[in-house]
Amino acid sequence: MELIWVTDATYAGGYKIALTFSDGLRKTVDLADYQFTGVFESLKNVENFKKFKLSDWTVEWNDGIDIAPEALYSM
């Protein structure tokens, strides 16, 4: 698999994020069933979840919490 990164990310309601990847793929990822444990614990609160931003390569939340673009791509 070639190197993939997120080029655009938009909140899509609930625990969903509409993503565009560097290869042009567009998809909406639903993280409602994601295991928000450990460093991800704060993201169980949807108000915290929807405060993500786009970093250089993926979506990122406060404190540098992120999910690898390859993981998002394969969801």
Image: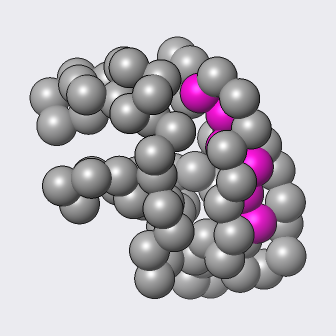
Tell me: residue 34, above or below residue 8. above
x, y (%) of residue 19?
Answer: 72, 57
- Foreground: 3 or 33? 33
Q: According to the image, what is the colour scheme of the structure?
A: one colour
Relative horizontal placement of residue 55, taking residue 62 as reference (left or right): right
Q: Is residue 3 visible?
A: yes
Q: Does residue 34 appear in the picture of this structure? A: no
Q: Is residue 60 left or right of residue 7?
A: left
What are the residue bounds of the magenta stretch? 15-20
Asked if residue 15 is positioned above or below residue 32 in the image, the reply reads: below
Is residue 18 one of those drawn in magenta? yes
Residue 8 place in picture, x, y as percent = 69, 69
Res. 17 image quadrant: top right
Which of 41/27 is in front? 41
What residue is shown at x 58% (from left), y 51% (from top)?
Answer: 72
Does the segment drawn in magenta span residue 34?
A: no
- Residue 59 in the image: x percent, y percent? 48, 60
Secondary structure mostly seen in magenta is: strand
Q: How many marks?
A: 0
Residue located 78% across and 80% down the image? 23
Going 64% across and 22% down the picture, which residue do you hit? 14
Examine the rendered structure and indicate whether residue 54 appears above or below residue 42. below
Where does residue 75 sit, x and y in percent of width and height? Answer: 64, 41
Q: State whether residue 61 is above or below residue 33.
A: below
Name the residue at 16% across, 37% down. 39
Of residues 44 and 6, the one nearer the viewer is 44
